[in-house]
Image (cartoon, rainbow, N blue to C red):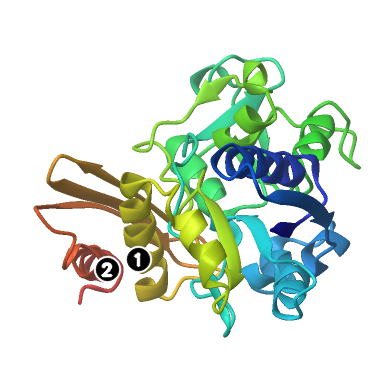
Amino acid sequence: MHYKVGTRGSKLAVQQTTQVIEKLKAAYPDDTFEIETIVTSGDQNQTSALDAIGTKGVFVDAIEKALLEGRIQLAVHSMKDMPDMPQSGLVFSRAWKREDPRDVLILRKAGHLEKLKQGAIIGTGSKRRAYQLKRLRPDLEIVPIRGNVDTRIRKLNEPMPDGRMIDGIVLAAAGLKRLGRESEISQYLTVDEMIPAPSQGTLALELRADHRELLEKLNALADEATECATKLERGFLKAIGGDCHMPIGAYATMEGDVYQLRAVYGTEDGSQLATVCVQTNGTMDGLVERAVDQIHNQLYGC
């Protein structure tokens, strides 16, 4: 069987898709795979802040349309870019093993967040990252920055319009590792310092719901721990009602029969930011609801 695999055209997106295809080729040597790059509305607008151009779907709209029309049979996305539910007629496979979920700092001069000068400038387009950084270092100045990995790192070494230099940027460890650029990381932020975006480091493999044979092939390569974490993290995202306007993060782990979920959620302006860590033994049931209840108690007293 020949499959066309759709992806965004950035280096990272293509690299992720190439890695997926390599794994599929190894598992199913009789099948062939072809990459098709597709421009999404989110790619067309590289200047506006993420929360100003719409929902997470702006990075997948054109790709999902190609799936529904049958122009491609499989799409590879970063799961953290996906809305909480796929479009009608589409499904995700079970999750494959995730890459490093942490956020990282790339700093121009300093080697660590604590070593940054007072009032240092950090670039990020994410409210989740911005407000958690401000909690660690209230003196920091956060400026919006967008673009692919190459673009963001380049902006680190170019003056802003006012002539000042950015002192550091925040990126996902997963993307840098997939691109072979982990040597440029100045500091890994622990999940206690900065809770990642829901399903950060996990790929979303999306296909038509009626393509059962391909779904079975994808599911056979799934990772149980990542699948459980994905259900919890995206379950929290859906239950809390989060969108691009709100700072929201979730990170789940499964060790033995212990399930743990860290979550962060705050007001749009970052004036309130609630963080919780809940766990259960033997079952995931009720974990998301407990996290949401505790978030609401912290923010609203109810």
Q: Residues within 10 Å of mark 2 (few under 14, many from 20)?
A: many
**Residue assigned mark 2:** 292
Residue 236's disc number: 1
| Secondary-structure class at tag 1 | helix
State yes or no: discs 2 and 1 in contact (Cβ < 8 Å): yes
- The answer to which of marks 2 and 1 sits earlier in the sequence is 1
Viewport quadrant of the N terminus: bottom right
Q: Which of 55 and 51 is in front in this view?
A: 55
Q: Which of 220 and 227 is in front in this view?
A: 220
x and y percent of residue 64 in the render? 70, 73
| Residue lying furthest left | 281
Would you say 235 lies left or right of 55 here?
left
x and y percent of residue 280 in the render? 11, 54
CA–CA distance between discs 2 and 1?
A: 7 Å
Question: Image point 77% across, 73% down: which residue?
Answer: 66
Viewport quadrant of the C terminus: bottom left
Which amino acid type is marked by label 1? Phe
Circle 2 or circle 1, nearest the eye: 1
| Secondary-structure class at tag 2 | helix
Res 273 visible: no
Count of marks overlaid on the render: 2
Q: Is residue 213 above or below residue 138?
A: below
Would you say 274 lies left or right of 249 here?
left
Question: Image point 26% across, 52% down: which residue?
Answer: 261
Q: How crowded is mark 1: few (under 14 residues within 10 Å), some or many (20 or more)?
A: many
